[in-house]
Image (spheres, rainbow, N blue to C red):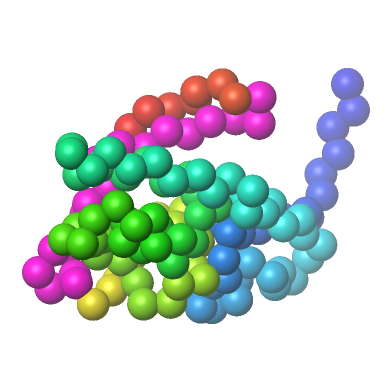
Amino acid sequence: MCSQRHNMQIRTRSGGHDYEGLSYVAKVPYVVLDLMNLREIKLIIKNRIAWVQAGATIGELYYKISEKSNTLAFPAGVCPTVGTGGHFSGGGYGFLMRKYGLAADNVIDAHIIDVKGNLLMKL
């Protein structure tokens, strides 16, 4: 078995953009792992739960919630094109955080799944 060292880095983009632009820069060759096709959003209004894939944007999440409810919301950011995966894992600052906390404070479960669909971790 041949083992080669390389300086390749992986950058992950969860469907939108990032404020710092770190998904698109590196000092060495890099690959962008784009999650934009993983954008399904399932709402269970009676339980006040949303299952959101990492590639969905917060704008898409807001829109889905507004389609189903006039009274529910989610305390996330102000830029609708930011991907939920990156936004939530970075804390999720937004206008509602003083009253309801960060977006990450409202995440009650997460699943990590590999490329073959195997569940690797359930938080």
Residue 17 in percent (x, y) is at: 57, 70
Choose between 110 and 62: the one closer to the eye. Answer: 62
Q: Quadrant of residue 13?
A: bottom right
Question: Which residue is at the far right?
Answer: 2
Note whether 44 is above or below 79 in the view shown: above
Point out the image quarter for the C terminus: top left
- Residue 113 placed where, x, y %? 53, 31
Q: Quadrant of residue 79?
A: bottom left
| Count of number-bearing discs | 0
Q: Is residue 25 left or right of residue 102?
A: right
Q: Position of residue 110 (x, y in %)?
A: 37, 37
Name the one closer to the observer, 23 or 97: 97
At horizontal 21% and vertical 62% (from top left) the residue drawn is 70
Whether residue 91 is visible here, answered yes or no, is no
Looking at the image, residue 16 sits to the left or right of residue 75; the answer is right
Residue 73 percent across, percent down from the top left = 23, 61
Instruction: Please tell me which residue is depicted at 31% across the width and 61% down the height of the picture.
Output: 66
Q: Residue at x 47, y 54 (%)?
A: 85
- Which segment is the magenta one? 96-116
In reply to whether residue 68 is colored magenta, the answer given is: no
Q: Is residue 114 magenta?
A: yes
Residue 109 in sight = yes
State the residue at coordinates (46%, 61%).
60
Which quarter of the figure has residue 1?
Answer: top right
Q: Nearer the viewer, residue 30 or 104?
A: 104
Q: Is residue 113 above or below residue 86?
A: above
Residue sitting farthest toward the left: 99
